[in-house]
Amino acid sequence: MMQFAFFVFAAITVAGAFYLLFTKNVLYAAFSLLLTLLGISGLFVFAGADFLAVSQIMIYVGGILILLIFGIMLTNNKNFQRTNLQPNKIEVEHHNLFWAVLVAVIVFLVFLKIIFNANFHIIGKKIHNGSSIQQIGINLMTDYIFAFEVIGIFLLAALIGAVYIAKKEKV
Amino acid sequence: MIAIQNYLVISALLFSIGLAVTVTKRNAIMILMGIELMLNAVNLNMVAFSQYDPNRLHGQMFALFIMVIAAAEVTVALAIILKIYDYFKNLDLDEINSLKK
C-alpha cells in the first residue's frame, strides 16, 4: 500500500515535469510546475521529512510559484497572443529541442549507471520513523545557528535588492 | 519502506528534465522554472539520504537552506526580468542581445 502511494506521487511528479518540458504555453507550464512541487512534497513525507514537506508547500507553491505566475502575467506581450478568445494562450517557442532532449537523456543514463553501480553501505539500515521537527529546531539553534542568522540577513538583503531593482526609474 | 534507489532515479529524472527545460525554452521565466526543477531534484536527494541519519538530519537542514536560497534567487531574478521587460518589451532570450541600444 505504501509502495503504491509512493509510486502515485512519483508519477505525479514526473508527469508534471514532462509536461513542463513539452508544453509551449507558459501558463500551463507554471501549473504543471505546481503539480511537480506538490508531488515532491508528497515524496518528502515518504522520506520522513514532514517539516520539509510543509515548508515545500508553503515556500514553493505559496511563494515562488505565485511569484512566477505574477511575472508571467506582468510580462505578457499582447502581440504574441493569437486572439482575445484565448486570453491565457501565452506561447513560447522551443529551440534546439532535439539536441537538448538528447543531452538530457544521456545525462540521465549516466546518472542511472552511477546509481545502480554505487554500493551504498547504508541500504540495509533500518529507518527511523517519526517527526523530525524537534530535531530540526534543536539543530537550527545549536549547530546551524550561524548559517541560520546568515541566511536571515541574506534573505533580507535579497528582498531589499529586489525592491530596489524593480522600482520605476524617474526619467 | 522504500528503497533509496527509487528516490535517486526520480531525482535524476527531474534533474535531466530541468536541464532540458533550461536549455530549450526561450522565455526567461521558463528558464527560472527549469532551475527550480533542478534545485528540487537536489533537495529530494538530500532528504532521501537524510532518512538514514535520524539523529543529525544534516540532509534536511541542507534542503531547508537550499529552499531559502531558491526563494531569494527567484525574487531577484524576477525583479531583473521585469526591468528587462520594461526596456525591451520582450522576454525572448534570442532577441535580448544588447547591453545598450
Image (cartoon, coloured by chain):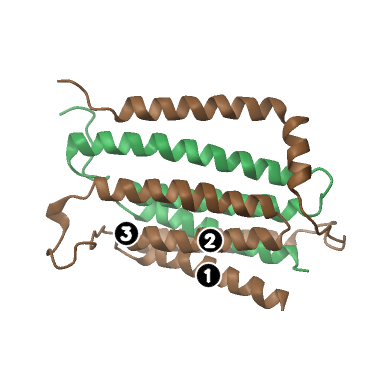
Chain colours: A brown, B green
User: Which of the 4 quarters of the picture holds residue A110?
Assistant: bottom right
Q: The numbered mark 2 sits on a residue in which chain? A: A
Q: The numbered mark 1 sits on a residue in which chain? A: A
Query: Type of residue at label 3?
Result: Leu
Q: CA distance from mark 1 to mark 3?
A: 18 Å
Q: The numbered mark 3 sits on a residue in which chain? A: A
Query: Type of residue at label 1?
Result: Ile
Give the mark, 1 or 3, whose residue is nearer the N terminus.
1
Residue A27 - label: 3
SS type, badge 2: helix
Q: CA distance from mark 1 to mark 2?
A: 8 Å
Q: Nearer the viewer, residue A13 or A104?
A: A13
Q: Residue at x 66, y 71 (%)?
A: A6
Q: Locate residue A14 relative to residue A141 in the image: left or right.
A: left
Same-chain status of marks 1 and 3: yes
Quadrant in which the N terminus of chain B is drawn: bottom right
Residue that mark 2 sits on: A38
Same-chain status of marks 2 and 3: yes
Quadrant in which the C terminus of chain B is drawn: top left
